[in-house]
Image (cartoon, grey):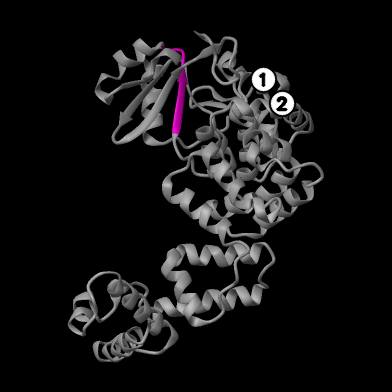
Amino acid sequence: MEKIALSPAAAAILGRLEAAGFPAYAVGGCVRDSLLGRPPHDWDVTTAARPEQVLALFGDCHPVPTGIAHGTVTLFWQGEAVEVTTFRLDGPYRDHRHPDTVAFSDRVEEDLARRDFTVNALAYSPRRGLCDPFGGRADLQSRLIRCVGGPARRFEEDALRLLRAVRFAAQLGFAIHPATAAAMDAAAGLLSGVSGERVLAEWRRFLPCPGAGALLARFGPLFWAAAPALCPAGGEEDGWLAAAEAVEAAPADFPLRLALLCLAGPEEGAVGRAEALLARLRPDRRTAGEVTALVAAAHAPIPRETPALCRLLADRGREGALRQVALWRATGRLSEETAEQLTGGLLSLLERGVCLTVRELALSGGDLLALGAVPGPQVGRLQRALLEGVWAGRAANTRASLERLARALLKEEALLP
C-alpha cells in the first residue's frame, strides 16, 4: 500500500475521526503534491462526519465553521490550520460558479466525482491507502490535466475551472488532455460571468509560471473572454502571439507580464487597454500603478546617459526601473547585452548612493531662502534644478558645491524677464 507522509495536524485529525468511527482522508492538492514529491502548501481533509459532529469532536482545536453550509470546518491543531469537509454531492450550478444545493454523502467516491481534474480527485487514508477512482495517479505519471467525467459538464458547472486548468498545467508543467482542451475552447465564453477578483487570483498564480506564454498562445480566446480588454481586433491575433512570446521571454514577475499582455495591439491603444484591464481585475493600487507605468513607458525613449537613468530611478524606484528595462528587453527594444548594461548602470548608481530626491540634497529649502531665494515656487524649482545638476555632474551633493550651483542658478533667474 502506497504511503504518504502526512503533516502532524493532518495525521492527528484523521486518527481522531477514524477512532470515532468516521472514515476520513487527506484529499486534493496535498495528495497530488505528495505523490509528485512536492511539499504541500496546506492539508485538507474529507470525512463522513457531518459538520456538527466535527465541531463536537474537535472542540479543543478552536473549530471555525468557515463554510458550514457546504460542510467545511477549519481546525487549528498546534498552530496548523486544516479544513475538514464532509463528503458531499453538489446540486445544479445555475450561475456557472456555485452549486445551488449541497447534499452530504457517506462515500468518498461520490465526493471525488464532483471535483474538477483527476489529479485533484485523489484521497489518501493511512488505513485504506490511496483512493483514485478516476485515474489521477496515471495522469500524474503521464503529466496530464484531464477533467473528472465529461469535461463540458465540468466547465458548465464552474467556469473558473477553465483558468484553473491552464494554471495547473503551467504550475505542474503538464499538458492538457485533448478532450479537456477542446471543451475549454467551446466553453471559453462562460468566463465573462466570473468576477474580476477571481480572474486576478488565478492569473497571479499562472502568469509567473514557466510555459505561461505557450498556454496564452494556445488558449487566446479563453483569456480574451476573461478580460475583454485584451481581445484583439479582427486580424490582429499576431499581436497576441507576439505578446505571449514576450511573456515567455520576460522574468517571472506578475506586473511585468501583465503589462506585456496590454501591449498586444496598436501602440496608441496600449494605455487604454491597460486601464480597461485593471478596471476588470481590480488589483491592489501598487500593482495597478506599476502596470500603468510600464505600459505608458513601453515606447518612450530609452535612457542611456546618467541623468536619464537617475530620473528613471527617481520616478520608478529600484524595482520599477529594473522592470522597465526587462519590458524593453522582452519586447525587443533592447538587445540582451544592452539590457544588461542598462541594468548594471542602474544598480551601480544605487550602490554609489546617488541622490534621487530633493529630500536627500545636502542643501535644504531653508538654506536656499538664506541664499536669497523667494519663498514659494522658486524654492521648488531650485531644488529640482540642484537635483538635476547633481545627476549631470555639475555639482556634488555637498553643502559647499550645492551652494555654488544655487548662487549661479539664482543669478540666472535674476536675469530672466
Residue in front for this viewpoint, 401 or 63? 401
Q: Residue at x 32, y 89 (%)?
A: 411
Question: What percent of the width, then of the height, locates residue 336?
Answer: 66, 72
Residue 41 in the magenta stretch? The answer is: no
Towards the viewer: 78 or 14: 78
Expressed as whole percent of the image width and height from the top left, the position of residue 285 reads: 42, 47
Q: What residue sits right under mark 2 in the picture?
A: 187
Q: Is residue 353 visible?
A: no
Q: Which mark is residue 156?
A: 1
Question: Does residue 260 sit above or below 180 in this rendering?
Answer: below
Give above or below for 96 relative to 181. Answer: above
Q: How far across and how far down the image is residue 200, in percent?
A: 53, 39
User: Is residue 373 visible in this depiction of the protein?
Assistant: yes
Q: SS for tag 1?
A: helix
Residues drawn in magenta: 43-49
Could you classify mark 2 by the number of other residues whose Cα lies within 10 Å: few (under 14), some (14-19), or many (20 or more)? some
Which is the main secondary structure of the residues drawn in magenta?
A: strand
Kindly indicate whether the residue at mark 1 contacts the one at mark 2 (C-beta within 8 angstroms): yes
